[in-house]
Amino acid sequence: MKCGEIASRPVITVTPDTPLEKAVELMADYDVGILVLVDKENPKRVVGVLSERDIVRSLAGKAPLTVPVEKLATTHSIIYVYADDPIEVAAEKMMKYGIRHVVVVDKEGGLHGVISIRDVLKRIGGLRK
Ligand code: AMP
């Protein structure tokens, strides 16, 4: 199965200047563990990811709810797979980098979706084939 097919849920994106409070609301409303930060001018260009872990770390460090997400997110070395890659590539990257999410991009590098470790686990029977 291809990463592009698995990443079928709409991606919840924010721009880098979004306050933490809004980001937390979005995660709760959409029941997601990660938000993708995209360029203000180009919503296909990924500029970072903000996961629940980043939020826990920020709140433990007493970050105010007004802080823009770009200050808390991972903005360097985003781990991605191509929509045409098989699911094994996403699983390998999650293991290798110790992350629970990978960004899926199209051939041009534009945002296509996100795969979570839950998506991979759901298909583990298929992986064993
Ligand atoms: P996670 O385990 O995916 O919830 O995230 C753990 C840490 O890895 C957080 O600091 C995230 O910002 C970061 N992270 C998650 N997914 C990615 C990704 N695809 N590329 C780079 N960093 C990521």
Image (tube, rainbow, N blue to C red):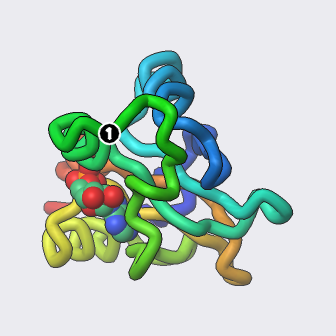
Residue 46 lies, with reference to residue 16, above or below; the image says: below
Q: Which residue is mark 1?
A: 63
State left or right for residue 81 relative to residue 42. Answer: left
Report crowding for label 1: few under 14, some 14 to 19, many 20 or more residues within 10 A (C-alpha). Answer: some
Q: Position of residue 106 (x, y in %)?
A: 66, 73
User: Would residue 117 be visible to someone looking at this image?
Assistant: no
State left or right for residue 38 relative to residue 70. Answer: right
Query: Residue at 55% across / 37% down in the picture?
Result: 19
Is ligand 1 within 8 Å of the beta carbon of the residue shown at mark 1? no
User: Would residue 106 be visible to someone looking at this image?
Assistant: yes
The N terminus lies in quadrant: bottom left
The secondary structure type at the circle numbered 1 is: loop
Q: Position of residue 76 (x, y in %)?
A: 42, 78
Q: Position of residue 45 (x, y in %)?
A: 70, 69
Query: Residue at 27% across / 43% down in the picture?
Result: 58
State left or right for residue 8 relative to residue 92. Answer: right
Query: Residue at 45% across / 57% down in the picture?
Result: 71
> Which quadrant of the figure shows ligand 1?
bottom left
Query: Residue at 50% across / 64% down in the picture?
Result: 48
Residue 25 lies, with reference to residue 9, above or below; the image says: above
Which of the two residues, 12 or 122, is positioned nearer the viewer here? Answer: 12
Q: Position of residue 102 (x, y in %)?
A: 39, 63
Which of the two residues, 61 or 54, is positioned nearer the viewer here? Answer: 61
Which of the two residues, 4 or 127, is positioned nearer the viewer here? Answer: 4
The C terminus lies in quadrant: bottom left
Q: Based on the displayed image, in which of its 4 quarters is residue 77 positioned?
A: bottom left
Which of the two residues, 95 or 36, is positioned nearer the viewer here? Answer: 36
> Type of residue at label 1?
Ala
